[in-house]
Image (tube, helix red, strand yellow):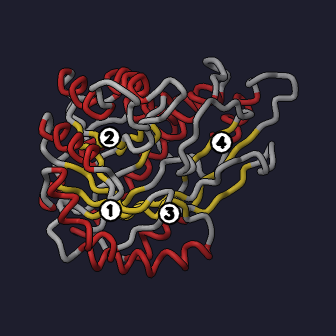
């Protein structure tokens, strides 16, 4: 990604699962040149080495040509035995496939993990992502100031070779937004003291579960993650989010009722339909309702691959699919929506 020529970059934090990867694989150039997705490697009960291998297989099928991705293996446990390391396995395999990666570093990473990241970065661009904050705590500029030099030394990197992500994890309400905003400003002011490649503020606002939302109607959910970024009024600060997912990493599958998470300007529209003994066939009605709504884009099916899939179901074509497909459609629309928003904002600022 040519960060030097991008006043604003987009760094979505995506689960490394089939739905999200399928969405990324369908993105259209030149939009992908403005995005550096962070893929979190999902843990399973198979163990970290098998999890890394499964992740690599999916990535090789999904990443568009010339796209760089960041890989966060922080959810994987350290292997119990042997010489193999998950992040190194991923880096070696993707180097062989010609897919460039940046390892993601955290302040809490052990010396061994940072050494692993150093070797992984050396196989690729030599550049990294430093991610402050996350599920355990908000970014802490004072703690980062105390540990940053040691982290860079152990990882064999420099601040000039690092993209910084200030991850505030979950911003689910106006109250959360009011609490996080001054902290984000403080962290951004600290970050500006250093020559980072880019600085990105990231958070998520999708609820952990949709089960309590009504069926057979569209429900709006505020995009507090976007509101946080807009409140900062820092045009050169990149935007990060968790796509259309809750930030929490889960283990195991899920079988929700037919639903769509559809991104609009300031809200998500959530569509749900009870199965009522018809399996997932309610998806056809959901798609027809969405296509008839005011928030369906003027471009219609041409807006993104996800919108094209929704439009097909609206007229009864194709199968109703399953949760992985619904997540892929919504994520493809979301990524396209955000990239077009950032592109329009940059053109407006330059004009």
Mark 2, mark 3: which one is toward the viewer? 2
Q: Position of residue 244 (x, y in %)?
A: 54, 47
Q: Position of residue 232 (x, y in %)?
A: 39, 76
Is residue 248 or residue 285 the one in the foreground?
A: 248
Residue drawn 72% across the image and 54% down it: 219
Q: For mark 3, what is the residue? A: 225
Q: Residues within 10 Å of mark 2 (few under 14, many from 20)?
A: many
- Residues under labels 1 and 4: Cα distance? 32 Å
Mark number for residue 200? 1
- Residues under labels 2 and 4: Cα distance? 34 Å
Q: Quadrant of residue 71?
A: top left
Q: For mark 4, what is the residue? A: 290
- Residues under labels 2 and 3: Cα distance? 22 Å
Q: For mark 2, what is the residue? A: 71
Q: Residue furthest right?
A: 276
Is residue 276 shown above or below 144?
above
Is residue 119 or residue 350 the one in the foreground?
A: 119
Residue 189 in view: yes
- Residues under labels 4 and 3: Cα distance? 23 Å
Of mark 2 and mark 1, the one earlier in the sequence is: 2
Of mark 1 and mark 4, the one earlier in the sequence is: 1
On screen, residue 178 versus residue 235, left or right, reads: right
On screen, residue 34 versus residue 279, left or right, reads: left
Q: Residues within 10 Å of mark 1 (few under 14, many from 20)?
A: many
Q: Quadrant of residue 23?
A: top left
On screen, residue 319 versus residue 194, left or right, reads: right
Residue drawn 37% across the image and 60% down it: 239
């Amino acid at each position: 990604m040519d960060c030097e020529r991008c006043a604003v970059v987009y760094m979505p934090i995506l689960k490394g699962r089939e739905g999200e990867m399928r969405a990324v694989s369908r993105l259209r150039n030149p939009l992908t040149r403005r995005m550096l997705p962070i893929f979190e490697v999902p843990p399973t009960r198979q163990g970290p080495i098998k999890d890394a291998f499964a992740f690599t297989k999916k990535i090789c099928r999904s990443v568009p040509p010339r796209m760089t991705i960041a890989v966060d293996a922080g959810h994987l446990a350290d292997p119990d035995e042997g010489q193999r390391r998950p992040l190194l396995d991923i880096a070696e395999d993707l180097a062989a496939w010609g897919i460039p990666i940046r390892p993601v570093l955290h302040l809490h990473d052990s010396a061994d993990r940072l050494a692993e990241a150093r070797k992984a970065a050396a196989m690729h661009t030599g550049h990294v992502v430093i991610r402050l904050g996350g599920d355990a705590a908000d970014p802490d500029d004072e703690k980062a100031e105390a540990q940053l030099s040691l982290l860079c030394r152990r990882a064999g990197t420099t601040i000039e070779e690092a993209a910084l992500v200030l991850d505030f994890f979950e911003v689910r309400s106006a109250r959360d937004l009011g609490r996080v905003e001054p902290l984000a400003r403080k962290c951004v002011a600290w970050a500006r003291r250093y020559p980072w490649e880019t600085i990105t503020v990231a958070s998520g606002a999708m609820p952990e579960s949709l089960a309590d939302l009504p069926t057979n109607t569209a429900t709006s959910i505020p995009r507090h993650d976007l509101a946080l970024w807009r409140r900062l009024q820092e045009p050169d600060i990149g935007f990060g989010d968790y796509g259309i997912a809750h930030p929490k990493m889960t283990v195991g599958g899920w079988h929700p009722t037919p639903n769509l998470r559809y991104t609009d300007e300031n809200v998500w529209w959530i569509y749900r339909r009870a199965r009522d003994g018809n399996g997932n066939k309610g998806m056809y009605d959901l798609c027809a309702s969405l296509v008839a709504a005011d928030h369906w884009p003027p471009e219609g099916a041409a807006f993104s691959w996800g919108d094209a899939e929704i439009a097909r179901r609206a007229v009864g074509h194709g199968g109703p699919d399953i949760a992985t497909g619904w997540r892929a459609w919504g994520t493809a629309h979301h990524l396209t929506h955000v990239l077009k928003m950032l592109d329009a904002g940059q053109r407006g600022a330059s004009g």
